Structure formats: C-alpha cells, structure tokens
Amino acid sequence: MHCAHHPTCPGCALLDLPYARQLEIKHARLAEAVGRYPHLGLPAPPPVLPAPHTEGYRHRLKLPLDARRDPPAVGLYATGPSRRVLDTPDCPVLAPGLRRGLDAVRRALRGHREVHSVDLRISDATGELQLVVAADGGSLRGGKGTARALMDAVPGLASVAVSRADPARKRVMGRTPQSLLGSPHVEEAIGSTRYRLYPGAFFQVDPRSAVGLQALVAELVGPARTVLDLYAGVGAYALALAPGRTRVLAVEEVPQAAAAARAMAPPQVEVVAARVEDLALDEPFDVAILNPARRGSDPDVLARLARLAERVIYVSCGPETLARDLDVLAAHGLGVDHWQPLDLFPQTPEVETVVHLVRRAPLRTWKVPGGHAGGPWHGHPSGAVGAATEAVALVVGDPGPRGRAATATWERLGVVATHALLRLSLTGPLPAALDALARRGHPLAGLDPRTSRFFADKAGLLRPFAHVTRARRVGAPIHGDLMQALVTLGASPQLLERLARAGR
C-alpha cells in the first residue's frame, strides 16, 4: 500500500513490509505473549488468517482536528513532542466513502476552533455517514444550525452529534455524545445480521472482515442451546447467534449499546445493561463468549465464568492481556482446546485471536527444577512452592539501593517507571517483609489503592507484584504477567535479562 504521509504519520507501522511478512510479525507477537507462560503447555499458534482487504478497510475513524489551520487539519498526531496534527484526509486505509466524507467534514468545520476531534463512521450496509464532534464544553458553535450546514455540505451524512472534549487534550474523543440533528442511529450489517449503531458505539472497523470472525465464533459455539455473551456491545455475537438457541444473555455496560442490542433482539435474547464485573449471576450456560476491550478481563470475572460455563470462547484484540487471562482461566479449570489468530488491522502489528477453552483440571502448580511452582490466581504470590528464601517485588517509589525490612534484606535491581524492583533475601515470612516496606511508604505495585489503577491500565498488572523466585532448592522463573508488566513499563533490556535468570 502506498501512502504519501508515511513514515511521518505513525498510523501504519508495518506499511513498508510485504503483507506476508506483516502476518509473520503478528504471529510472532502472539507467540511471544503466550510464551511467557510456558507452564500452560500451549502449542505454537496457527498461522494468522489474512484480512480480505488490506487497504480501504476502515469504516470508522477517530482523529484529532486542528481548526486553527485552513482548511482544518485532521489526522493522527505527529511523532515527537510537538503534538502537531497531521493532515491526512486521503489516508489509504480509510474506506473510499469515509475518505470523501472526512474531506467534506473538515472543510465544513472551518473556523470552529472549539472542535477538538471528529468521530466519523460510514455504514457498509447503507452508505450513510454518522458524525460525532468533540467540542470544548460539549457545545458546537451554532448548534443545530451548524449541524444542518454540515449535513448539507457532506453527502450521505445522516446524523450529527456532539460530545464533551477532554479539557486537557489527553483523550482524543469526548464523552457522552448527544445527537444534534438527523437520525439517532445508523444501521450496519455483518452478513445477514443487522445492527443499530448510536453515536460513538463500538463496532468492528471492517464489517467485511467481521464476517469471517463471526463465522469462526459460530463454528466454535456449535449446537449449544444457551449462550452467555459478555462485553456484548451492540450485540455483535448475541444477535448473530440467536437463531436456533433457547436462550442468549448479553451483558453490556454502555447503556446506549445495550439499548441498541435490545432494539434488534429476537425474543430468545435478553440484554442486560450492567458492568460485567458487577453482575451477580449463577445461571449455568452451555457456552460463554468473552469479548473484552484491549485491557482484557478481570480475574474475578474469569473465576466466576469458569463456574458458569462448560466452554468459553475468548475473542481478544490484545495478545498480552489474552495470555494473562488464559493463565487465570487455566488456574480455574478452563484450558485451551483450539485457537486461531486473524488479521483485522492490516498495516499494523495488531492481531485478533479467537480461543476455544474447555473444562480441564485446574492448573494450580506445575513442575520446576527442584519441586513445584504455583500461580497467583488463588490469593498467593506466584513462584516456588515451599518456605520462601528469595523473592522479587516491585514497590511504589524507591526505598534505596539496599536495606533491611523485618524478615528480609533487599537489594534494588533497578528502577522501572520511577518504582523500585527489589530482590529480597528472606529469613522469615515474605508478608512480614512486604508489610514493613509498606509501612515505610513503599507498598507493592498492584496493591496500593493510590496507584493500582495506573499499573492496571498501563501495564496490565491485576495483582500485587510479588514472586517467590526460590524456596530452598526450588527455583521458579518470574511469572508471565509480571514480566510483561515490566516490559510494558519500559524496563531496560539489561534488567529484564537479569530478572529472567532469577529462579533458574
């Protein structure tokens, strides 16, 4: 694919590579992510299924807009500290109708400096365009008059909505879109299934690629009579799978998305507007579909899911969080039966993966040199099983290069994102040493409520960062989720190499 804006624009990191090589890189990323959990015993992933279209595939864009220029610039931010908005209305990964609509939208927004970004969607089913502008204070100058001018200027524009821009300009898109003019929703289709999309709703960027994704999920669901669909969105799977089922329960926390699914649902589909994490459910299902955002799911959700469903189909857009969540599910008795990566985002390193999990014995411990190691998903630190003699811990802040804390002496191995990675030599229980460090103002990363959200969002760390590397003669390499967290937080290669040798 040729693009006049590459490589200044950071949007298509793999554009210079032949498509076959792009698929190899996606495959390697998935293999590396799951390879951090060797105790799962997973085979190499199958080859990545190619996308049917490698350019002109995006049917939705969310981009910053700089109305100080004439015409306004719309595109990604340039790499570097300038935060300059690139002007790329002819971006070749956008569907042709979306490119035409974007150019018309930016010209119609001349002088609207209150507009921070645009969210523009084109329906593959109807050809209609749906626009959301993020504006300062959630108000578009001129209100409905400006919305009418936009609809007159942009062919096919069916609706205009406005959302409240982030005052700090850290988030590209705004919050709580409100319709100004036109249809409150557009319709889209994947295969023969129709969907209702309100402004800002999540949907697959290429409905044509989604046909193959849904076919794969449907094949794995098989003849199941009852289906639980978690993180259901507008009902992408629940509605497609409804024919022939006795009961389908879809759970989605965004009220408008749940309402959209409910509006199109047949009688056997029930849609619940609730956070998956808050749902109290004890009803068994033949199969559950799990389709979380890139950050993955919550360990408590996965533990409950393992009690509710005999089989789980996990649809993931983040290999690193998928690998962590497969580790959690294995600990609660669901193991990988089949998996298939596929490409929904050509020209980028992103890779989608569909995993089929079935009932197996819970994987709580496994053999390592000298004995056994255990996982962290039942309330204990990961690592060597037995009386701990050495451990590693990432603590908030920096307690210094070395010192003593109750039952341990520590040595600082390195600093990661301003926090200290410590190696503790233990003469007594590990919790006593960690409690002593916490009392000095250095609690474990992932445990301190003041910083736990940072570690969860930025590093995928969903538990306290503590690992027993040695219990007398038993050695256990650092657990996969902790190593991945350090990689994500920018730990140096030297520190990662030093840590990889711990417990061996």
Image (tube, rainbow, N blue to C red):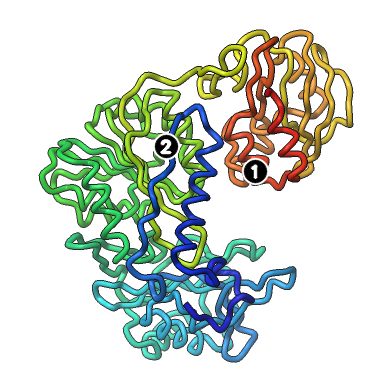
Given residues 268 and 162, the one toward you in this image is 268
Image quadrant in which the C terminus is located: top right
Q: Which residue is mark 1?
A: 454
Q: Are marks 1 and 2 in contact (CB under 8 Å)?
A: no
Q: Would residue 314 be found to the left or right of residue 402 on screen?
A: left
Q: Would residue 13 be found to the left or right of residue 82 on screen?
A: left
Q: Quadrant of residue 148?
A: bottom left
Label 1 residue SS:
helix
Q: Position of residue 204 (x, y in %)?
A: 36, 61
Give the residue drawn at x 53%, y 38%.
35
* Mark 2 nearby-residue class (10 Å; few <14, some 14–19, many ≥20): few
- Compared with 84, 178 (above or below) is above
Q: Position of residue 299 (x, y in %)?
A: 48, 31
Give the residue drawn at x 57%, y 66%.
13
* Mark 1 nearby-residue class (10 Å; few <14, some 14–19, many ≥20): some
- Compared with 338, 203 (above or below) is below
| Amino acid residing under circle 1 | Phe
